[in-house]
Amino acid sequence: MNLGDLVVRKSYGGDVTFRVEGMRQNNNIVIKGTEFRLLADAPVDDLVTVPHPTLSERTKQAQIKANESLDRLQKQRQEQSERQLASLRHIEGGQLADKGYFDVPGKVLHLDGDPQYLKKSLTLYNQLRVPAEGHYINESGMADSLYRLLPRVRPDIVVITGHDGVLKRRQPYDLYSLDSYKNSHNFVTAIQVARQYERNLDSLVIVAGACQSHFEALLQAGANFASSPGRILIHALDPVYVAAKAAYTSVRDTVNIHDVVHHTISGSQGVGGIETRGSYRIGLPKLQDLSTLKVTPSVS
């Protein structure tokens, strides 16, 4: 078994496809979900190598749902553009619509405890035309990083994610206690720092959490959207989906919570949140190609 191999766990019925990330003592292998935000370890004799690009049925379904969610976002974006033009046609006899407009979507600051998931997330932001700055930061260092990054980036939306999970060694599980989770306490601290910077829930939208995170604690700390109400594995790109929805929802409207909850890849047991205004604005007139302008300089 080599680094980068695709594997499944026999003890879980091969439900999730993982990639081998490293080795630990006692013949334990570090594995990471290819689609789900799950970092785990397993005995080498519990793992079965699967040929590339073979994926488990659950992983295949996650990819299908991810593509459906992306298509839905793009369709909603097109419908939004059509509504904007229709609205402008009612102003000044349609002259503004003829001149067009430009988009000012919300800006995202994305902190991720996993470099590969961060790379995937930034690729999707770019595909969706969401302005985003991303940083790979260990979950324990996110709070300190936000002290430095928030005043410089001045984002409209902050995504705080990485790896989390309910700890196996704590039995029976006390799901009300932050001590039962791998990184939920780090996410809570990071959210609190962000809320010290901006208390208004609509001026700074916070999307936080990862697999099996303490949903209630993240919301109480000040997150607008969080995982995971049902303590399930969430898809790697669920936080991006939520952030993109907020980035392109008008400042005059609230983000459609029903749409977010039911059309993220992980569904209502994976992501939840509270009523929140969007961050999207339009500008007039449409931005021009400055290289084509004929300008007479007026200052010597």
Image: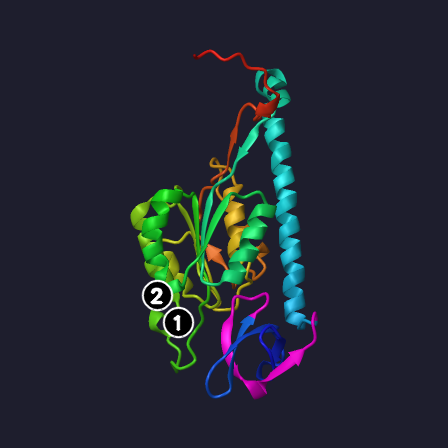
Measure how far apart labels 2 and 1 are at the Cα level: 8 Å
Percent from the top left, x then y, of residue 105? 51, 39
Q: Which residue is mark 1?
A: 181
Q: Residue at x 59, y 31 (%)?
A: 84
Percent from the top left, x then y, of residue 270? 51, 63
Label 1 neighbour load within 10 Å: few <14, some 14-19, many 20+: many
**Is residue 194 in sight in this rendering?**
no
Q: Residue at x 63, y 51 (%)?
A: 70
34 falls in the magenta region? yes
Percent from the top left, x then y, of residue 213? 43, 66
Q: Residue at x 51, y 57 (%)?
A: 118
Quarter holding the N terminus? Answer: bottom right
Percent from the top left, x then y, of residue 199? 32, 46
In this picture, which residue range is highlighted in magenta?
Answer: 33-53
Q: Quadrant of residue 16?
A: bottom right
Q: Which mark is residue 185?
A: 2
**Is residue 186 in sight in this rendering?**
yes
Q: Amino acid at mark 2?
A: His
Local secondary structure at mark 1: loop
Please say if the residues under marks 2 and 1 sit with CB atoms less than 8 Å apart: yes
Q: Amino acid at mark 1?
A: Tyr
Q: Which mark is residue 146?
A: none
